[in-house]
Structure formats: C-alpha cells, structure tokens
Amino acid sequence: MLPRLECLYKHANTCAADFWQDIAPVYLKENVTGAAPAQATWFKTAWTDSELRVLFLAADIDAWATHTAHDAPLYEEEVVEIFLDPVGDLESYFEIEVNPLNAVCDLVLRRTRGGWIKDFAWHCDGLKHSVEKTAGAWTVEMAIPFASLGPFVPAPGKSWRANFHRIDRPKNSQWELSAWSPTGQPLFHVPEKFGFLDFFSYAGDRR
C-alpha cells in the first residue's frame, strides 16, 4: 500500500521558531528492503498560500559534498531529494535536490516512448533553501513556490503524488538509499511508487 501524508496549512507569517512545532516527523526507510537505514532521516511538510515547505533532518557523523554549482550531479555524493507530481498522472514530475553545501539541482522528468527525459532547463524560480550542519546531523529547509510549478496550487482535500529521498554515502562503508515510499529497487525513479501528499487546512480536516 502506498503511503499517505497529511500536509497541514500554515500561515506564512507564522513565527519561524513555531512553524514546525506541531508537525510530526516522518522517517525514511531503506529503499530496497523498507528497513530502518543505518543513519536515520526524517522530514516534515506544510503549505502556505504560496509555498510548499519541507524540512529534512539527516543523522550523519560526516555529512559531505564537493559540488557547489547549480545543476551539478549532486546525486553522486550526499543529498536529499523531493519528487513532486502535482497532476498525479505519473507522466512527468519535478525533482529538487539539495546537498550539505546548500547546492541545488532542479529539473523536470518526462516520460516518453523511449524512456524518461531529464529537462534541466526548468528552474524552481524563487526557491528558498538553507542548510545547517552539526556534529551529528545536517538539516535542510526548503520553501518551494507554487508559482514555479505552473498552474498547480493545492487546496484542502486535494492530493499530489510525491516522494522524499536521501542518498547517504559514508566514506568508509556502503552507500545507502532511503525513501518515504520505498521503490523496492536500488533506484528512486519509480513514480508508480510515489505516495500521496494530502493537503489539509488544519489537523482535523479529514476527508
């Protein structure tokens, strides 16, 4: 069964210190087996009138990256990733990656008869992103403007298809893929496994 996640509405002017307080973390699973990863990762989501907000926290005793250029192959190193399909037809989706150096890779993937095409011409205009590192973890916060995704604005009771990922590459041990909705394969690009991001106006607003 594909997972569902309640994405709560927040006023954009909510105090930064309080914004995430009442939202429970959701933990990623190892992408092939669904087991707990060696180094845990959780994320939280919320939405405002104009943005999708996402917060990741990745346990990591040695978070590292070298890529700093926009649209560099961040997936070759350590990174967190978001896949979003606002239409829900699984024929195309947005991908946004951020690494421990706060570098960004953003693109659109489109299904064709010959396979998936990556379009790096798209940029998530107005994307806000920040990274903080401590001795035992790194956090990423993103604010994704709905305007950058085209005419796709959520509303209470609506759902988007989505997945949330991490690539962990410890320098002295096996690399690991984690996902909110594991694909059962050693790769993330399986849109049929995307979960459902359900937009609500408040915690009691159930369908």
Image: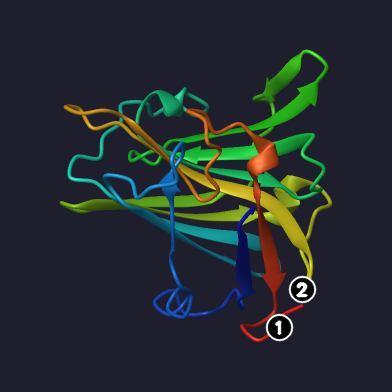
Amino acid type at circle 1 is Asp
Q: Which residue is drawn at 48% across and 43% down?
A: 165
Q: Which residue is drawn at 44% across and 74% down?
A: 16
Helix, strand or loop at mark 1: loop
Is residue 168 toward the left or the right of residue 34 in the image? Answer: left
Name, please, the residue furthest toward the top: 114
Q: Position of residue 87 (x, y in %)?
A: 81, 48
Q: Is there a contact, CB below 8 Å, between mark 1 and mark 2? A: yes
Look at the picture and state if 84 lies above or below 119. Answer: below
Look at the picture and state if 36 lies above or below 73. Answer: below
**Is the residue marked by circle 2 packed among few (<14), some (14-19), or many (20+) residues within 10 Å?**
some
Is residue 153 toward the left or the right of residue 186 in the image? Answer: right
Judged by depth in the image, the label closer to the viewer, 1 or 2, is 1
N-term mark: 1 or 2: 2
Amino acid type at circle 2 is Pro
Q: Position of residue 159 (x, y in %)?
A: 75, 61
Camera-side residue: 118 or 70?
118
Residue 205 lies in quadrant: bottom right
- What's the colour scheme? rainbow
Distance between the alpha carbons at the discs numbered 1 and 2: 8 Å
Q: Which label belongs to residue 156?
A: 2
Label 1 belongs to which residue?
205
Q: Where is residue 142 in the image (x, y as percent from the top left)?
A: 50, 54
Q: Position of residue 139 (x, y in %)?
A: 35, 54
Look at the picture and state if 79 lies above or below 35. Answer: above
Q: Is there any visible trace of residue 45 in the rendered image?
A: yes
Q: Is there any visible trace of residue 57 in the rendered image?
A: no
Q: Which residue is drawn at 42% across and 78% down?
A: 21
Camera-side residue: 93 or 53?
93
